[in-house]
Each structure stands twice: as structure tokens, then as C-alpha cells.
Amino acid sequence: QKEVEQNSGPLSVPEGAIASLNCTYSDRGSQSFFWYRQYSGKSPELIMFIYSNGDKEDGRFTAQLNKASQYVSLLIRDSQPSDSATYLCAVMADNNDMRFGAGTRLTVKP
Amino acid sequence: ETGVTQSPTHLIKTRGQQVTLRCSSQSGHNTVSWYQQALGQGPQFIFQYYREEENGRGNFPPRFSGLQFPNYSSELNVNALELDDSALYLCASSYDRDSGEQYFGPGTRLTVT
């Protein structure tokens, strides 16, 4: 059983739309949640982190966490072609073991 | 740029050989984690080093070993290379072992033939 699950996509949205990326995790003891962006051929880049239930906003990005449902999401408002990348959800357990999902590939069409 | 560097960029080895990959963490970051990323997959946690000691390990065999040095550099050593070890190897540094806010280096692409 995969521990961090994401839709592999590809997810395609038009420029200016809202992109919604979802992630579920199996370890109820997980405490910290992260979203990384990975452009093709590059390494992951941290874009958001969230530790408490609810929403956290940073510019065009909003992370949402629901620990009861074991669900974390990332919303990207006013999507731009430069947002086209693979988005990795990562979950850290108590033992500092960071588990990544396989990623969702997002394409923003001009 | 994250300030994390890795060398070499690419490497080709033969099955059964040994390899050492290097990472230089961001200044002030006392924790480094190593990951293996196969094509089309997310990074898989190999191990973490905090102040020169192993601080956690993923589901990788003992032939994957590491070292961390006082000057913020670290190494990943892999013995008895197998074809399945072909992957992108990433190191990520963080300011503390409890911080999941990690900053990745550009990676080393290892090909085992």
C-alpha cells in the first residue's frame, strides 16, 4: 500500500484558471506536510508547507490540510504557463522519515 | 538557487562497482538527507544525517551508506552496484533534524550498466 497517494495526471488547466492538486496519506501520526514543485530535469523545489489543519496562503498558492481525512491539497490561483511542472506531495512522520508521492504533472495552457 | 551543490552531475558505473556521491549543504544547515528518485517516481528517502551521525533510515540495504563532515559536506556510498540503482540521487539540507523544510541540490544522475 502506497503511503502517499497523488493523482498522476496529467492535469491540464487554461491560463488564469485555478489548479487543484490533491494528496492523501496513510500514516495518522504524520505531523508535517509539504508541496514541492519539480520542473522536468530539475530537482524538487519547496513551495509550501503546512503543519496545522486549515488553510495556509502564500501568494497564488494555498495549501489545505485535513488531518481527520488524511488529506492535503494545493490550490494554484491564476495559473501561469510557468507553473507547468510536476507537483510532489511530501509527508513527514515522527521519525523524520519524509515520504513523497509520485507527483501530479500539471500543464497550464496559454 | 538553494546553495546546495552535488557532484558529479552524471556518472556511469558497471554492475558490482562502488560509487561515492558528494553533497555540499547550505551554510548553517546541520542536517542532510539523501534520496533516490527513479524516473516518473517521487524521491525515496535513503537516510538522514544530523551533526555527523545517522538520524534515520529508509528501506534501503546496508550497501547504501553515508558520511557527514563538519564542513557541511556529505557523501553517499553505494557498494556492489545493481542495475536497479540507476536513478537520480538527491541530497537535501535543512537547518535542523526536525525540520521538513528541505532544500535540494541539483542531483547526480547515476547509470549502472
Image (tube, helix red, strand yellow):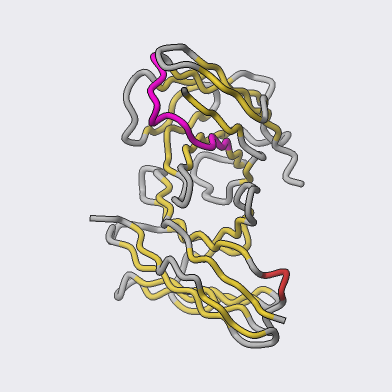
Number of numbered discs: 0
Q: Is residue A33 left or right of residue A40?
A: left
Q: Is residue B27 left or right of residue B44?
A: right
Compared to B67, does A92 lie above or below? below
Compared to A35, does B112 lie above or below? above
Front residue of B74 and B99: B74
Residue B81 part of the magenta-drawn span: yes
Kindly identify the residue that appears in the image at 57 percent across and 58 percent down. Answer: A36
Task: Look at the image and give the residue range highlighted in magenta.
Answer: B80-91
Quadrant of res B62? top left
Residue B90 x/y as whole percent: 56, 37
Residue with the most extreme left position = A1
Compared to A18, does B80 lie above or below? above
Quadrant of res B108? top right
Front residue of B86 and B23: B86
Residue B95 x/y as whole percent: 62, 41
Q: Quadrant of the N terminus of chain A?
A: bottom left
Front residue of B4 and B108: B108
Residue B27 part of the magenta-drawn span: no
Kindly identify the residue that appears in the image at 66 percent across and 40 percent down. Answer: B106
Kindly identify the residue that appears in the image at 42 percent across and 29 percent down. Answer: B85
Q: Quadrant of the C terminus of chain A?
A: bottom right
Residue B98 x/y as whole percent: 49, 45
Kindly identify the residue that appears in the image at 49 percent across and 36 percent down. Answer: B87
Compared to A92, does B55 lie above or below? above
Residue A50 x/y as whole percent: 51, 66
Residue with the most extreme front position = B113
Front residue of B22 and A27: B22
Q: Is residue B19 left or right of residue B6?
A: left
